[in-house]
Amino acid sequence: MLNLLTLLAYVACIAAGNVIGVAPENQHLYKPDSNGNWACLLDPSVVLKYDQINDGICDCPDGSDEPGTAACPSTKEKKQLFYCANEGFFPKYIESFKVNDGVCDYDICCDGSDEWATGKCPNKCAIVRQQFDEFVEKKRADIRRALQIREEYVKKVERAKADVGKKLERLQVEISDLEVQIGEENRKLKAAISSAEELDSGEQGALEEISQLSTQLENFISDFVASEKKSRSTIVQLESLLQDLSENYNPNYNDATVKQCVRLFREYISGKEEDNKPESSFSVELFKEKLKSLKPHLQSLSQNMVSIEPSIGNMVHHYYMKLISTFKPKEEQVAVRSTTQDNVSNKRTIAIEEKIKKLDKTLHSKKSEASIYEENLLRQFGTDDIFRAVEGEWVHRKIGEYNYKIGYLDSIYQDNTLVGRLTLVKGSTLHFEHGAKCWNGPHRSAFVDMVCAPKSRLVSVSEPEKCQYRFLLETPIVCEAKSDEQIADEFSVDPSDL
């Protein structure tokens, strides 16, 4: 049975022609018929007396006869709602089970009408309205500032991307140039190898011809030496006879022939002797011409030898000394010749190969650097690539007994303990995983929910499950323009100020 206050309130509403808990636009649904009766809204077959509305007894199957009480429970199909007029603010609906429960639900019914039967809750809509207006004004100002900061971040991102793009373009040009250089050096290397092979063939012919010439020279020298030895032997005998004649002849003996012979011998002895050269078919001049024609081949061989200005004289001297010396065994000559030929070809090819190696090393380094820039440009950094602007930034705050440190695109630390490393960016939420293992528990992980604000600030941290954290982070990077309706939806009453 309703108490006296309930009855008075009920009578006042009836007198005013309004049904408690029903919005003005739906009051017509609660008009009685000509007989003073009223039918349930969803089941007109159930007809009640008009005074059975809001009598605290649920008579209609759909609960429509108790819009102002908690008599009819809500169902999955239909919630029972009570209308709060909230004059001076915004009208709202509260679930019927909260009506007349002795609790002032000012966040929904600032006019206290949900406690119409108890009379415990005076109208606070004026205060709530003031709170709301202040909230909206501050929220709009915060959003404006945050959007300005975000716009600066966007510009920063554009500059950063442009800078990365320019660096990548420069690297691509350098890579292209290096590839051209390497191609050119490879062509040089191929030509050097081919030239060395041709030179080897030319050297073989040159050495064979030199061998023939040296054989002729050797034979000539041998003949010359033999002839000279024979001549010297004869000369020695003649000198001995003439010496004896010169010393023992009788000067008083007037023999003109003898005197003339003695005189000529003495002149000979004093140094006026004539050379006795053997005749030979070997032509020194022809030998010189032959060596001259082989000069180009000899010059290539001389590149790995002692630097001596090529000349016919020193070449003749070289091969003369070689011929008159003791020849090395044939296998040693082959080894020396092979080494010389290797040096001729290797000296040039090794230099080219070394240059190619250096160019290849530089090319590899440039390509690695370019791949980093390419990956950076392809990587997703959220809407407008906004997270590029805060890459490397950290947010610090001590909450409770722990110091927390959050790196937007890096990791989270609780003091020195790793909570997790970033693995996913989804909308305004960051997911961090693979943190340090909890004692007798899982590896630490965390979600960071970001909300719009002019400055980055860690608001709160919770641990819904063991070693699984939830952070609330204010930051301008997730800010978007909002309508008045969206701002209003974020408002909540501050009960401490009522």
Image: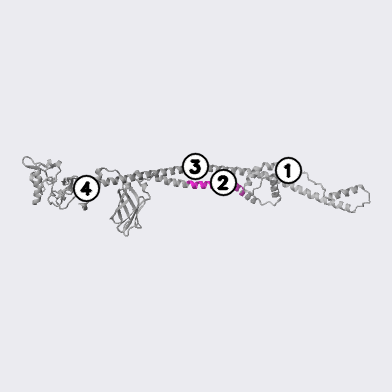
- Nearer to the camera, 148 or 66: 148
Query: What is the distance, in whole Å, between disc 2 and disc 1 at their CAs?
Result: 39 Å
Q: Disc 3 designates what residue?
A: 177
Element under disc 3: helix
Residue 340 circle label: none
Element under disc 2: helix
* Earlier residue among tags 1 and 3: 3
Kind of residue at badge 1:
Val
Residue 284 circle label: 1
Q: Disc 2 designates what residue?
A: 349
Query: What is the distance, in whole Å, between disc 1 and disc 4 at their CAs?
Result: 125 Å
Foreground: disc 1 or disc 3 = 3
Left or right, 222 with respect to 466, comes to right
Please name the residue shown 80% across and 49% down the image: 230
Element under disc 4: helix
Res 317 seen here: yes
User: Where does the magenta region start and end?
Assistant: 339-363
